[in-house]
Image (spheres, coloured by chain):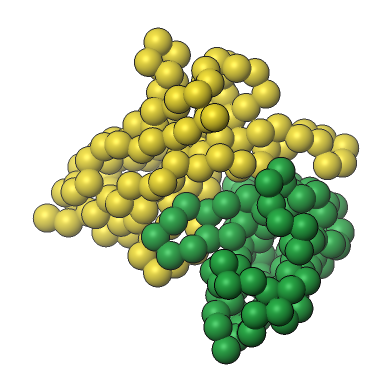
Chain colours: A yellow, B green
Amino acid sequence: QLQLQESGSGLVKPSQTLSLTCAVSGDSISSGGYSWSWIRQPPGKGLEWIGYIYQSGGTYYNPSLKSRLSMSLDMSTNQFSLQLSSVTAADTAVYYCARGTQYRPSTRTTDVFDIWGQGTKVTVSS
Amino acid sequence: DIQMTQSPSSLSASVGDRVAITCRASQSISNYLNWYQQKPGKAPKLLIYAASNLQGGVATRFSGSGSGTDFTLTISSLQPEDFATYYCQESYSIPFTFGPGTKVDIK
């Protein structure tokens, strides 16, 4: 059974770079038909999709974060990663990694987030 | 970006009640609509995808309907383990956006 586990810096200073990794177990991230996403949730608030990366290395980012965002895949360790630069207090959140499974409800293919990690809390503070 | 709204923002219900949560998109998204359940301190769990398809392993008391801009998640007979926050999410266009959530608690 596929499992995802986030890890990384729990406390980041303002203006620095937030770095997180998601370890995938139970299947290979090189398997076709999936995307690998990051989603965050500020304290007491709703969910925000950050972006995803495909097996090919292709990425799609939320435009609101795109200028500060970088995602990568490491197939040798079966992990994918997130880097968010120039962080502020507004980036304080629980960060989740998730698998997106492709499906086609209508005329084109999209992804649904069907397996999630447990989440990791990141606080931006000096 | 597509804006998602949900109503009500919260509701109180009893075990055995039929509960309906509404989600509205700011533009037509066909049936590119998913529903998640989140319990405190836990990750969201996929319940429904493509507006009306039940995710494997999810109880059949959950159902989804709608198309275009208006969608509904229905719980036919609320169980103790269903008290949680429910989010809709559009997968029609990037950035995929979530609704603000509907908290279901015990009356």
Residue drawn at the location 60% of the way across and 17% of the way down: A31
| Above or below A33: residue A118 | below
Q: Split into 4 quadrants, where in the image is the C terminus of chain B?
A: bottom right
The reply to whether residue A70 is visible in this rendering is no
Depth order, front residue of A65/B82: B82
Q: Is residue A4 above or below residue B68?
A: above
Query: Is B23 left, or right, of B36 in this rendering?
Result: right
Residue B30's spot in the image, x, y percent? 85, 52
Indicate the position of residue A29 as horizontal and vertical percent values.
Answer: 52, 20
Q: Residue furthest left?
A: A126
Identified at 80% across, 49% down, the residue is B53
Q: Residue furthest bottom?
A: B107
Left or right? Give the position of A28 relative to B74.
Answer: left
Looking at this rendering, what residue extends furthest in the top direction?
Answer: A76
Residue A33, position in %: x, y?
Answer: 67, 23
Vertically, is A86 above or below B42?
above
